[in-house]
Image (cartoon, rainbow, N blue to C red):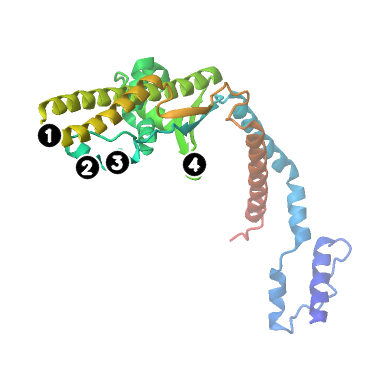
Amino acid sequence: MQRYALVIRARRFQNRFPERFPVSFLPMENPNPNLSSYDDEIDLWELWETIWSGRWLIVAISGVFTLGGVTYALLAQEWYKADVVLAPAEKKSIGGALSQFAGLASLAGVDIPGAGGQEPVAVLKSREFSRAFIEEQRLLPTLLEGRSSDGDAPDIRDAVKVFDKEIRSVTEDKKTGLVTLSIRWKDPEIASNWANLLVKRLNDRLRSQAEAESARNVSYLQREIAASSVVSLQQSMGRVLEGEMQKLMLARGNEEFAFKVIDRAVPPQRRETPKRTLITLVSMLAGGFLGILVVFLRKAIANRPKR
């Protein structure tokens, strides 16, 4: 086996330097039928020679790709992301003595004070809330600027889709309960203003809804108490009325009704995209790999046996 390996190495050496060995000094016959399998081994030196011979082509292709990547990174639109960190506002629940009248309140169509914690997040993610914000701030032309509409007038549904998928994002940490509202936009000042304004608008909206609901419940309970002649029923409904009055008072006096702002949005100093260094490196590597591939394909085509 060692003998045949030496023979193969000698033949390769002779092929590389034919001027020194014009006549083969090796036996032409192959006594071992498995000897041909050694010719299929990868020759690293031959691979390096192929790459080195086409080095200028590789450099040229890599340079073109790198130049294209740098051009794109410099000309691409810069995007900034502003974040607001929120915590669900603590709701003062009704006392234990009032909880026994929850069934009575539900039969009367009155909600016991204390809203679910998932409602503010659901409203913040809703399309209806995004639509109202876009209409209030008149953002329809801004959001659809540069987007083809096939000659049709800008549609609010398209603006809502762009706002929900590309601009606004909401993430919730299940362990801590913190909610992060992120706004991604071309101008850092506008991004931070929109984020803070969305939180304020959400708190105002949910507070107004709770205030109106409690006011209706108070009015209803007062009428029912006045119309009832059963003392025990009047006392029970009076406790429910007390809870609704407390809920109404909290809604009127609490600006951060749904969310408390832990960390307000500030204009970001650094852009989120494009990542110019990463784009340049990826372009350079892609050009280098493509250049090596082209060199090997060129050699394979040149060494193809002619028919």
The residue at the far right in this view is: 20
- Of label 4 and label 2, which has the lower sequence position? 2
Amino acid type of the residue tagged 2 in the rendering = Gly
Viewer can see residue 98:
yes
Q: Mark on residue 173?
A: 4
Residue 135's label in the rendered image is none
Q: Is residue 110 above or below residue 136?
A: below
Which mark's residue is nearer the viewer, 2 or 1? 1
> What whole-number distance in Å separates the C-alpha atoms at marks 3 and 4?
30 Å
Position of the C terminus, as image quadrant, is bottom right
The label number, if any, that marks residue 103 in the structure image:
2
Residue at 80% over, 76% down:
5
Q: Which residue is mark 3?
A: 99
Q: Is residue 69 left or right of residue 88?
A: right
Q: Earlier in the sequence, mark 2 or mark 1?
A: 2
Q: Nearer the viewer, residue 184 or 207?
A: 207
The amino acid on which the numbered mark 4 sits, given as a three-letter code, is Asp
As measured in the structure, the alpha-carbon distance from the residue carrying label 2 to the one carrying label 3 is 9 Å
Disc 1 to disc 3, C-alpha distance: 20 Å
Whole-number angstrom distance, CA of label 4 to CA of label 2: 33 Å
The reply to whether the C-beta atoms of the residues labelled 4 and 2 are less than 8 Å apart is no
Which of pointers 4 and 2 indicates the residue nearer the eye?
2
Q: Upstream in the sequence, badge 3 or badge 4?
A: 3
Q: Secondary structure at mark 1?
A: loop
**Relative to residue 53, is residue 236 depicted above or below?**
above
At x 66% / y 57%, what residue is drawn? Answer: 303
> What whole-number distance in Å separates the C-alpha atoms at marks 4 and 1?
49 Å
Question: Which residue is label 1 attached to?
Answer: 230
Q: The residue under label 1 is which amino acid type?
A: Val
**Badge nearest the viewer, 1 or 3:** 1
Nearest the camera: 17 or 88? 88
First reached walking from the N terminus: tag 1 or tag 3: 3
